[in-house]
Image: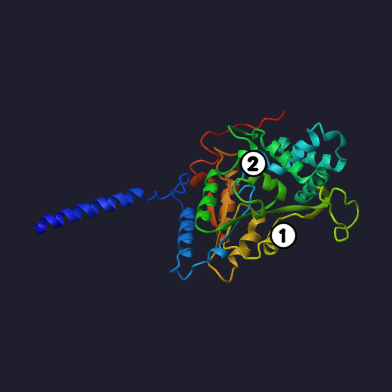
Amino acid sequence: MRNLSIKILVIVLAGVLCSCNQNEPAQKEYFTLWNECEALTALQAYVQDVTDPQSANFIPVSDRIATFDMDGTFVGELYPTYFEYNLLEYRALDDVTYRDTCPEDVRQTAQEIRNFVRNGTKLPEHFDMKHAYAAAKAYSGMTIAEFDSYVKNYAKTPANGFTGMTYGESFYKPMLEVFNYLEANGFTNYVVSGSDRFICRALTYSIVAPNRVIGMDVRFRSSEQGSEAGVDYTMGKEEELLRTDELIIKNLKTNKVLQIAQEIGKVPVLSFGNSGGDCAMHNYCLGNKQYKTAAFMLIADDEDRDHANRDKALKLGEQWRDSDYYVISMHDDFKTIYGYGVEKTDFVFE
């Protein structure tokens, strides 16, 4: 009788345990679009370490700050150049509502972009700043809502050099899994880009909150403010904010660090980028004296699925490793880049 009772008890307990296991949610798999690789292993090991309360490297949730460059890090930039360059080219040369009144210096800058993407003509020295000044002027007078709509409408355009994708859909899908994974582990993700802050907001609104986007900035003014200084003028209830042609900052290199310090107020513990313009941000992160850190560089080394230069990318990969950054290879580490329905094609120019 005693043995029978024990057997019954074991069966009951087994049933209870099975029932409990069935009710438990399945462990979420975050990296379905990645191959096994050094960079992903390093990222997961890092996160597991710093989120473990028993670890000497534990980081409180409030200090788990991750910064991401945008173009070429999780948004495509090879169609055939940056989104914001394509947008300015369209604005100045093709937009029938603007091109006839476009200032000559803006038109010239847009033409230099067109010559670069169509003919391979080298861009002038310090073109990033020349573009920034031209872009500030090209969208001057737009309200925040008007500019947001303008960017999102252009983002619906099919991405040049690809089928099955618009500019607004041109995310590196494996990198979006990184955003989700970090957020699930208590990290706060920030986008820190050289592109216009409001372009970044329009493109990444489904990924990060707008107050976690840092980028190039122009000065705003109230619609009725005129030339009066903001410290002297009181905005009315019915007024709107307008973009001006005054550039405040181009958010590249060390400027990224300065903006992170001013707007976030904490040193990141994780940093993701893809170019020399991100090295200062990476070094700021790795110089964090309080916490364990890591920095990652993505290289565009996949000539089959993207418009890349593999030899150049591999050389950059060696340079980034020497700088103590982990290297993410699009060719080796990503099962897909833009999604399985997207195909690379030749560029088409009308």
Question: Is residue 120 in sight in this rendering?
Answer: no
Farthest residue, direction left? 1
In the displayed structure, 251 sits above or below 139; it is: below
User: Could you tell me residue 182's position as x and y percent?
Assistant: 52, 55
**Tag 2: amino acid:** Leu
Viewer-nearest residue: 185 or 90: 185
Which quarter shows the C terminus? top right
For label 1, the residue is 255
Question: Is residue 327 in sight in this rendering?
Answer: yes
Compare marks 2 and 1 and give the one earlier in the sequence: 2
Which quarter shows the N terminus? bottom left
User: Could you tell me residue 25's position as x and y percent?
Assistant: 39, 49
Viewer-nearest residue: 189 or 32: 189
Please indicate whether residue 47 sits to the left or right of residue 92 in the image: left
Viewer-nearest residue: 71 or 290: 290
Viewer-nearest residue: 48 or 342: 48
Q: For the residues carrying marks 2 and 1, which lies nearer the camera in this image?
A: 1
The residue drawn where x is 88% and y is 49% is 224
The residue drawn where x is 27% and y is 52% is 16
Label 1: element kind: helix
Label 2: element kind: loop
The answer to which quarter of the image holds residue 75 is top right
**Tag 1: amino acid:** Asn
User: Could you tell me residue 112's position as x and y percent?
Assistant: 78, 40
The residue drawn where x is 86% and y is 33% is 100
Crowd band around label 1 with a 10 angstrom C-alpha radius: few (<14), some (14–19), many (20+): some
Q: Marks 2 and 1, how far apart in space?
A: 24 Å
For label 2, the residue is 78
**Total numbered circles:** 2
